[in-house]
Image: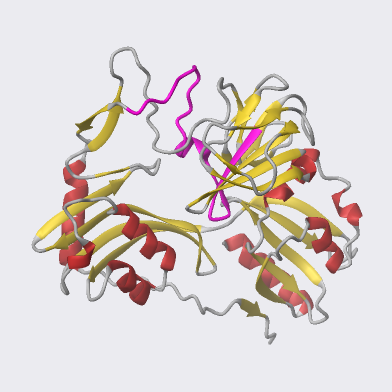
Amino acid sequence: MKSLIIAILVFSSLYGARVVETNWKKGELFTQYIQRYNIPNTLLDGISQSDKTLLLEIQSGDTFFELKDSNNTLLQALIPIGDEMQVQITKNYKTGKYKFDIIPTIFIEAEYKVVLPISKSPSQDINRELKYASLALYYGKLFKNRKEINFKKLQKGDIMAFFYTQKSRLGKPISDPMITSAMLETNGKKHFVFVNENGEKFSDSGKVIRYKVGSKKIAIYDRLRMPLRHIRITSPFTYKRYHPILHRYRPHLGIDFGARRGTPIMSISDGKVIYSGRMGGYGNVIKISHGGGFVSLYAHQSRLKARRGKHVKKGEVIGYVGSTGRSTGPHLHFGLYKNGRAVNPAKYIKIATKRYREIDIYKTKIIKIKGIEKYKNRLLALVKDKPKIHQWNPNAKNYYEYKGN
């Protein structure tokens, strides 16, 4: 945050400029964006092939910041790639030339506390008091499928309490909120949900796990399967990785699987093919929409089998491993997106290094979670404290203008 404010003040004092919050236009390429501001394409000449590939991660509708002078000349742009990195375009005020770089995103991450009496429903009350629809949706999903809770019979005066963490920039949320622990009290009974760093939820009685039955191997994920039968990871997912040679931070928003050319690629779940064709540095690409905001991406294919508009089943072959686009050898770059933002596939799919098969018959058991009483007591104390709620303002001023002396 500090470096962003300094940059704003320096440019503002020199140009009488202002920072404007805007959104990436649907279908616009990066080259088209810089052409709009009469920036020559030579800006990209010194960029590595891997950095050019990262430009494909800019999503339609992404919020980003532009610094402009009174003549609408672009002085600086900060465009997010994932949650922790961003493209920076900067105009040198002496030479007039533009510079391209990829730098870490400056943000604040903090924990927030919420205690609310229920007057209508948890989602409506959270939306009314916090002005944050994503958080309201998240809370509702935490208690989904809890048979002992009837949301239709919640009474006025029932209590909900939770802790959540949020990354923010210039006073606005970036990325999704993360509820770490929550409680819902209804009809005098308290119900708890806790979430670990991998996004797995469990109750105060413990965590339900699946386990092997005899010699059979059980798929321990609920919905998604691996895109290849044999798995060899050559590059993991990371929001921010320090390159030992370039001495720069770079994200890798997917998982690279090494495989022989022609190895069948399978859909991770049922869905509809929304893209099948060439996509710049990704080469031959297929994108599949699976519902619930999830879209999977399969890049560098040698041959595409599934066509756009086709409905595919989980495990159906959609293409074959290759090395098209910017690639040093045959491999599958696999990306997973939730609501338009890249997420770590390893959090949603069990990575299996050996062959396995899914079966429908399995057993479950509950294991106790260490420190569960500590988390429960923290929530109970929160209800007594009744902290002031932080309200996010969706109508906050979206630009900062230098007024001069």
Judge by depth and name the residue closer to the eye, 397 or 17. 397
Estimate the x, y position of residue 71 in percent, counting from the top left: 83, 80
Q: Specify whether 122 is left or right of 395.
A: left
Residue extending furthest toward the left: 188
Does residue 336 belong to the magenta stretch?
Answer: yes
Residue extending furthest toward the front: 310
Q: Is residue 322 at least partly visible in the picture?
A: yes
What quarter of the picture does the N terminus occupy? Answer: bottom right
Q: Specify whether 254 is left or right of 276.
A: left
Does residue 8 belong to the magenta stretch?
Answer: no
Applied colour scheme = secondary structure
| Residue found at x 67% / y 74% | 20
Depicted 364 relative to depicted 73: above or below: above
Estimate the x, y position of residue 165 in percent, counting from the top left: 39, 56
| Residue found at x 57% / y 32% | 316
Q: Specify whether 108 is left or right of 376.
A: right
| Residue found at x 46% / y 39% | 348
Estimate the x, y position of residue 156 in percent, counting from the top left: 17, 74
Magenta extent? 333-360
